[in-house]
Amino acid sequence: MAVLRHSAAFPFLLLLALLICIPALVSGVWLNDDGGGVEEEGEQFSEELFLKPLPDRKVLAHFHFQSTVPPSAANGRHHHLFPKAIAQLVQKFQIKELELSFTQGRWNYESWGGSDPISSTNAKPPGVELWALFDLPVMEIDATWKDLTHALSGLFCASINFLESSTSYFAPSWAFRSNVSNLRYGALPREAVCTENLTPWLKLLPCRDKAGLASLLDRPSIYKGYYHSQRLQLTSTKSTGIVLKQTLTVVLKPDVQRNSAHSSLDKSIQPSWSVSSMFKKNVTGLCVPAKTSRIFFELETNMVVELEKLGYGDSWSNSIFDLSPNPVRVFKESNPLPGRSNSIIYEFINYSEHEPLDLGMKWKLPFIWSCSQAPFHVSRFLMGSGNERGSIAISLQSTESNKEFLAKSHGCNVQVLIFQVVPWYVKVYYHTLQVFIDGKPQSVSDVIEKIQVSPSEDKLFPGTLELMLRYPCSVQSVALTLDFDKGFLHIDEYPPDANQGFDIPSALVTFPNFHSSRSYVEDNFSINSPLLLKFQEKNVVRSYTEALLVPLTTPDFSMPYNVITFTCTVLALFFGSLLNVLRRRVGEEERLLNSKGNTTRIRLIPLLLSKFSSKLKGRTDGTPKSSSLLGSKFLLILVAVLAVLWHYISN
Amino acid sequence: MAEISEDAPPPPAAAAADAGVQGEAAPTRRSTKPGRKRLFLTFSVLLSFLSGLPFFLKSTEIHRSPLPFESIDALSRRLQFDPPSLPCHFRAVFLRSGADRTLAARLQSAIAADMGRRAGNRLSCGGCGRGFAVSVTVDSGEECVSDDGGVAGSCLWTCGAVSLDGSGEDDSAVDELLDSVMRGAGGKECVDAGGGRVYTVVVMEKEDVESVRVVVGKHRHAWIVGKVSETDTVSIISKVFVKYFMNGGKEGRGMEKGIGEFVPVGADGTVVLSFSLLNADPSDWVYDWEFQEMSKIMLAPVAKALTPIANISIESQVLYHTPKSSNSYWDEKYGGYIFSLRDLPFFVNSNEWHLDTSVTAAGRSKVLQFVVYVPSAIECPLLLQLPNGEISKTNSFISPMWGGIVIWNPPQCTGDSQKKHLEGSTLPPQELEKIFQVFIAQLRMLFGLTSNYIDSSETEISKFLDSERGFTDWELDVLFRHHACFNLHSCVNTLESLAKLVQSLPRMIVMDEIGKQVKYSLEAASLAQMNASLGIYDASAASSRKAKALAEDAFFHPSIMSISYSSIEHYFAIYMPFFAPVSLHVLLAAIKELKRYKREKAKYMAFAADQARSS
């Protein structure tokens, strides 16, 4: 990839780079709080912010707050730093692990990265996703899960309690986590996420958003972002106590500051930004209870590669960009493949109470790089039309990022795990599973190594598909299709605004051969940052697909009442006429009519009516012809008047 | 059709005859009997409709479990006229030499009369009721003379069981000695008699002692040492009995309904005491506390003592960035920032103090918040001003049903403000102990007792012994009685509201479960009343609590909230389209048929009469 478009500046940049190439590890020695002797006792809290420029002129900000409490009998009752509510939750529901995420927007795997630790562990499907691992006998888990959803929905002001019904959650057997039976997974793709969810989340931090890094969280600016994912992760073990990780991942677009002098360059230069300009707020003061409070800034691998091509190495101030305060420390990713550049992390520490740490990045020249991609780009879509049936397709497109993997061995294989939950009203026919490799249909047994299907049961369980694919590395695209019928719901089961359609939660695609772990080399100190330690964990690369919207047939909701009134009226008509027919005396009526015609004064309307009816019956009786003529004329006039009136009224 | 045409003038002969008479007699006469077939038909339809009506109504009926409205009314009336009270026994013991036979009887009547005057006529909820038994024993060492005022079943003092001659001024030793005697044989007997609690005042006459000491112990007794005149003795004894042992140190207004109304116990009988240490601005200083150690020493006994009334659990947390929501002003005279009583309602900052309810307090249990507020440097020292202009000694206040707040000024705020205390420091243990003592006093006040008797009472009583449990036995008895009474009252209130609600919404579904809960609640309430009249304290408290919990369960049953109320209009709108036209047809047909039949029959009768006349 070409990096510099303006080759005129090139010699000058080289010179600058030579001057700047000083070892970056000078500063940071005087900070004594990261040294060896870490007190393990007591509750601890640390806050970190991770920033990374993204190739599409946006910036990723990832907040990581971590609270830990050592195992103790007083957990859930007496706390100093750790949120009491969470400890009580863990105690009451015997949670081993739990993850709850609220997400708005979709992680753009193509331009924001797909294989780095942030995207593989922090990119989440839109809406709410909750999974929990319980330390309970299997019999009690479902009841506990229901209670847990209610407790969480109260705690976070969200409708997590909709995950209570057995149609909305599921126990995956191996595709989500390997071989666990006491895990429950549920997702609500349509849940809207906003400040009312963020405020209770912030309440779990000792300083809330009053001080420290969390004070950056200005609601308008973070909700204006392109992606927003708020997460809460709990792990509780007998030996380490409870660890609570709260992360907030936002993708923001910095405002372009128009510079009149370089207006021609402006369009191609990445927008310069600083923490205060992006969040419209400054870090106000220190969060005193926090053990550490730092900001990391990462230059990702491809960026470093491009920089090195230009000869800048790992300098934070070169002719392409400047980082405004000098970093305290520099971490370099240790290289799994020697001879290749790797990502660099700069560390900044928020130590001063009065001077806000305003990390800024100033771009001087246009620079283009690409992010690290997941081995396959995953997408899912619906096919077919109409309200009766359709099919789901999942497609995997190679991103060419596994080239070196390819090069390593000729007969290599890629493994892919797919985990898909489908609500019961989308009735998937699993036997219709078809696999296309590079566009050609392939027999299912050749590609699928392992498959587990649990079909849905109406109004009881959702259907799930757990699938392991294995195919050669050289494959460019894989597509799976499944046909389904759309079911009918009972009138009570339709949600409000049923015409919008029904969501199918995102499928999770995992690449077990690919890991997103990183290891950092740093000269003197051991790494004690919870965030970097998390980056070093060995995580497999995962991506979520889009959520799907299936339109179902929605009834006319006033129909039951219409049916009732209509049938009742018809029945009443039938009944009434039957009764009349039964008690009618035709002969007598005729006699009466005759005698009346002779004797009594003729009233107009009854006469007309009787005339009309007798005419309809096709009978003629002994009434004089003239009166009949008169009647029919009158009838004609009446009908005409009625028609005119009707016309008048209806217009 | 042949059938139908059969009725009206069918036989040709008859028709001819008819035609023959028609000219003059057709409107008024007929020769044949009118047919009944159509009449029968229409009426059978009408009748089948009418007989189907009950089935129809039954099938569209809304299920309503029958609630015992009469029993609820009866219970509420009974409670109003006769508030439940647990019987108490009062016993005065005079240790004196040279008994005189009539003294006991005289003193008994005098004390009973004085107590009656003090207790007044109004029955208070949670008092000892009307018939409290007073007995007097004069113990001369060798023999005892007793008078129980004619009330059978009151238990008597065992003679010569105690002599206070040897004991000195050590009040707690005397207290323990008396307690051991009470718990001995005599005490057991009283419990067996089933007459409720026994309260004792021991009067020890000492000629050589000038001053009179009146000490109220921490169990169920008090003693008077010294030389007192008989009338003074009677008045002191009856005061101790009525004001303290019967009413828990409170007098006058507000006693009719009892203090039980303000007992902060949740409907399920649990209370969570949530202690929070608030650092208003951690950038000035941060304090932590050794809560657990101190709570084991100071709070655990209190929680244990209150177990019969409520199930108490204790929690603690430390919070940061929690400013108060109202401002204070600097006062030169006191050298501190003054927060006046006027602003107290605005002290608690519910926006920033996320004291949070706890998971264990889910449902209908009660959380009492106890807060230590550490002010920030700009408002330190922070002092609370009483309405009379003085500074509060404890620097604390309570908010009824919410909890209590203690302001603790850190020591360095009066000194020069060097900011080197960023590292967390802990509250010194002696300070924490003081704070805890204030908390216990606040807890007593929240439970409706006074924090301290010495301040409020007159000089007659020299000393009240404190229990290390925070509450003395006789105070717990008072709480017990009031609590039982209040539970019954609130149970009845809830049931009455439920009855009103159910009656006002005639088409609301009432589940069977609600009916069951109401029934059990009433049963438990009458059981509690029965136990109370028998004087079984704990059983009556337990069943009254159960009655209240069941009544609340019934009232807050989810089905009452969730099931949509189908109105009578809805009902009509569904069934009208069918039944209105059909019933119109049927009724009109029946009426017409009947009329015609009558008319025709009249014609025939006239014809028959004619026939008879002519023949």
Image (cartoon, coloured by chain):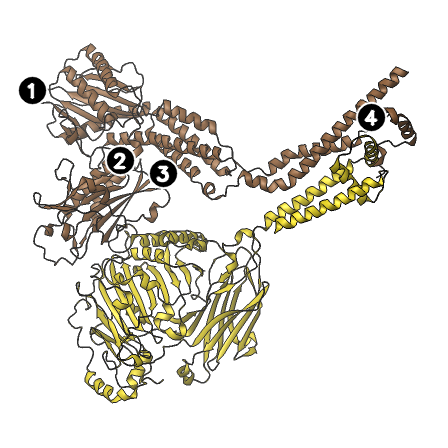
Chain colours: A yellow, B brown
Residue position for label 3: B267
Q: Nearer the viewer, residue A238 or A190?
A: A190
Residue on which the image places disc 2: B447
A544 vs B429, left or right, is: right
Taking the image as drawn, is residue A129 in sight? yes
Q: Earlier in the sequence, mark 1 or mark 3?
A: 1
3D distance between C-alphas at marks 4 and 3? 83 Å
Q: Earlier in the sequence, mark 4 or mark 3?
A: 4
**How far, Cα to Cα, is label 1 from label 3?**
55 Å
Q: Dot 2 lies on which element?
A: loop
Residue B28 lies, with reference to residue A30, above or below; the image says above
Image x and y of residue B573, in percent = 58, 41
Q: Which residue is mark 1?
A: B208
The verdict on a common chain for dots 4 and 2 is: yes
Residue A630, given in percent of the width and then of the height, sits at 79, 42
Check if mark 4's residue and mark 2's residue have beta carbons within 8 Å: no
